[in-house]
Amino acid sequence: MYDDNHLASHLRRASLGREDAVFLIEPGGRRISYGDFFADAERMARMLAEAGVAPGDRVMVQAPKTVAMLQLYLGSVLAGAVFVPLNTAYTAAEVEYFLGDAQPALLVCDPARQEALAPMARAAGVREVLTLAADEGGTLTARRDACAPGFAAVARGPEELAAMLYTSGTTGRSKGAMLPHRALSSNAEALAQVWRFTADDVLIHALPVFHSHGLFVATNVTLVAGASCIFLPGFDADAIVAAMPQATALMGVPTFYTRLLNHPGLAEAARGMRVFISGSAPLLPETHARWRQVTGHAILERYGMTETNMNTSNPYDGERRAGTVGFPLPGVELRICDPETGAELPRGEIGMIELRGPNLFTGYWNMPEKTAEEMRADGFFITGDLGLIDADGYVHIVGRGKDLVISGGFNVYPREVEVAIDALPGVEESAVIGVPHADLGEAVVAVVVPQAGASLTEAQILEGIAGDLARFKQPRRVVFVDELPRNTMGKVQKAALRERFKGLFA
Ligand code: MLC
Ligand code: AMP
């Protein structure tokens, strides 16, 4: 089925002929079969085509996590379009940039944001704005339901784009990572194989569906295995623990695991689970050890990136080594190189992690120069992560060569926050850092130098940037200093600041 559409055919293969098998289970108990899900995804595709979305056009969506959103993702793939999901936390000012950059043919947003976003969408040349609410109300589902059933999937080859995901950069401007059909299909298949997913699995899905982790890893792995998924609207420790006795697998960011460890029902509920998988941010060895102590399960940690999908994973059989991200996935090549010269380093030495394989993106949307900066001539992608390969072949991530904070699994590029703070009256300059935080892993902290004579408060800084930046990018604390530490080149020494403020949330 969908033979000419590379990704759709791969995602549908395992469920074909099992039309009554359950794909999604909602918290209220509604069960959606594979047959019904794909019938609605086809209606979505028809709706897109009738709305004038042509193959290669972008379909942008900033909407609540719903079954309809997943149908829109599959519908967009079937229609040959490029699916562009956005973090629901982005402010209108942030969405305006994405609209201008991606030039989508269609925008789907929460009805509550339609008034703010529709004029921006029009100015960016968007043909139509549809709405999708958390209860699935809105014009998207109404239009879907008005469409006739059935849709002949648009032919798309492995190298054509299926999705584009925005990822911020060290310069502060977000870049659209272009993901071809083969990157998503090959990665889902590699993960399902390595993690032993079968049609008997029931995954607890509590991640957002606008990032690689929740949209591709969790959803696509379920689809290629023909498995089922308990589809929760977001993280809720009670709901996850309550779901465990009916489930086999959980995928989460480290914050999921630290929060679940505080739940009194965890040990009992986790007993029958098959596997717990963590990624998107470093899982502390202490968390790994405590989880094992409480549940008897060793969390399986893996490493990925928006641009590359998943790269490495700890083994399903064999030692799941805490503090490491395991081995390269089948088909993925990983090497450690000197960040300056690019020369490959001997085993055990710390250097830049570089990757090559079918999992890689094809480049940044409209930014060929940025793409060229991050690719080697032989096709390896320069990740910006620093790591080493130990004597047994396990990959360790030991730091970041890029100025990035990962808060609760969301990436925050300090430059973007600094630009917003520096523009405020009374601010001389600022430096934004990540410091250890028990819940979020790292929390965003702004270190601000006021202008001579200016008296600034933390509240003034936070209020000043609130309309510009998504909540998760906003500093959890603002501290004031007389000057920023600099090296002889004049560069701000963020390591010194991180050391000085490391106890802020202790
Ligand atoms: C929410 N808030 C955050 C935040 N998430 N602040 C900082 N960092 C975060 N990650 C804000 C809320 O707006 C709220 O603000 C306040 O924090 C408290 O919210 P909460 O109710 O405690 O948060 P919650 O909704 O429970 O969200 C926390 C979370 C969530 C950890 C469950 O952030 C989450 O689902 N993270 C997963 C991110 C993810 O999927 N990453 C994958 C990226 S792909 P206020 O002001 O209202 O109090 C990738 C590749 C790979 O990295 O390898 O996978
Ligand atoms: P994103 O841009 O949101 O895709 O984030 C990708 C980044 O998250 C990677 O470059 C890593 O820095 C980080 N990351 C993902 N998984 C892990 C992990 N298991 N351990 C440490 N860092 C990780």
Image (cartoon, grey):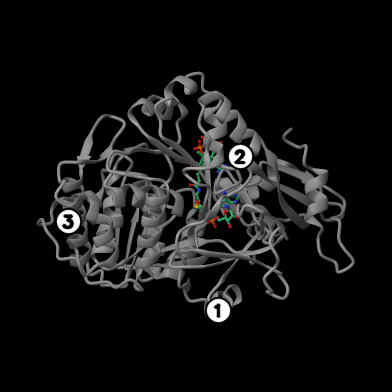
Q: Give SS at disc 1.
A: loop
Question: Which of the image's four quarters has the N terminus?
Answer: bottom left
Residue visible at 10% across and 55% down in the picture: 149
Q: Looking at this view, is 400 or 459 the one in front?
A: 400
Q: For mark 3, what is the residue?
A: 43
Q: Looking at this view, is 314 or 218 the one in front?
A: 314
| Mark 3–mark 1 CB contact (< 8 Å) | no
Q: Position of residue 244 (x, y in %)?
A: 39, 28
> Sequence-wise, which precedes: disc 1 or disc 2?
1
Q: Position of residue 257 (x, y in %)?
A: 54, 34
Q: Looking at this view, is 81 or 479 the one in front?
A: 81
> Sequence-wise, which precedes: disc 3 or disc 2?
3
Q: Position of residue 400 (x, y in %)?
A: 68, 57
Amino acid carrying mark 2 in the image = Leu
Amino acid carrying mark 1 in the image = Asp
In the rendered structure, find residue 378 and report the number of the disc placed on it.
1
Q: Give SS at disc 2.
A: loop
Specify the quadrant of the image occupied by residue 203. Answer: top left
Instruction: Identify the residue at the far left of this view.
Output: 148
In this rendering, the answer to whether 58 lies above or below 237 is: below
Left or right side of 470 for 13: left
Name the mark nearer the viewer: 1 or 2.
1
Question: Which of the image's four quarters has the C terminus?
Answer: top right
Could you tell me how far apart the alpha carbons at marks 3 and 2 are, in whole angstroms? 39 Å
Left or right side of 337 for 122: left
Could you tell me how far apart the alpha carbons at marks 1 and 2 are, in whole angstroms? 37 Å
Amino acid carrying mark 3 in the image = Arg
In this rendering, the answer to whether 32 lies above or below 70 is: above
Residue visible at 32% across and 68% down in the picture: 105
Q: Residues within 10 Å of mark 3 (few under 14, many from 20)?
A: many
> Mark 3 near ligand 1 (CB under 8 Å)?
no
Q: For mark 2, what is the residue?
A: 440
